[in-house]
Image (spheres, rainbow, N blue to C red):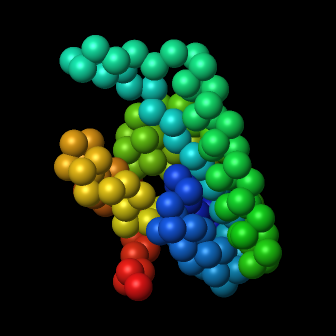
Amino acid sequence: MYETILVPVDGSDNSKRAVSEAAKLANKFGSTLQIVSVASDQRYVQYGVTLGQDVMQSFQERAEEILDDARDEAEKLGAKVETHFVVGIPKIQISKALPAKYGASLIVMGKSGVNGISRAILGSTTAYVVRHSTVNVMVIDYPRD
């Protein structure tokens, strides 16, 4: 049913839970997980901020750690996995570009990886993906303890 499942990760608890849920689905349907970490390349000119190469290098190093952890977890659960670091506007990449690029028919992602203040300023990537995705979206959210 779902040959390829896209799983965006950011290191948050909800994205970790999304990896676990996606791995379960992958086992059930024989799917391959395309686990991605997307670093924003937006320049915040209106705020006078431009990200330099050193900042992007730092983003990539952290993303590789997150991707390695996600791959390890998914493989431990028996899923076939490929990982990718992508630079772009996360909500656009996740909702449109990456499903097309990897042939994904489902996106499994956490409800939110940012705190309330960041979400109010930046908007919710998950909400955008749900509204604009070109494929089905499963949103993972677990109650807080």
Residue drawn at (77%, 65%) of the image: 72
| Residue 30, quarter of picture | bottom right
Q: Position of residue 45 (x, y in %)?
A: 28, 15
Residue drawn at (40%, 49%) of the image: 95
Q: Is residue 83 visible?
A: no
- In this view, which residue lies farthest toward the front? 145
Q: Quadrant of the C terminus?
A: bottom left
Q: Quadrant of the N terminus?
A: bottom right
Q: Position of residue 134 (x, y in %)?
A: 38, 53
Q: Is residue 38 visible?
A: yes
Residue drawn at (37%, 54%) of the image: 114
Classify residue 142 as left or right of residue 44. right
Q: How many marks?
A: 0
**In this view of the protein, which residue sits in the foreground, 89 or 106?**
89
Q: Is residue 135 above or below residue 21?
A: above
Q: Position of residue 86 (x, y in %)?
A: 58, 36
Q: Position of residue 124 (x, y in %)?
A: 29, 52
Q: Is residue 114 above or below residue 137?
A: above
Residue drawn at (24%, 20%) of the image: 47
**In this view of the protein, which residue sits in the foreground, 120 or 136?**
120
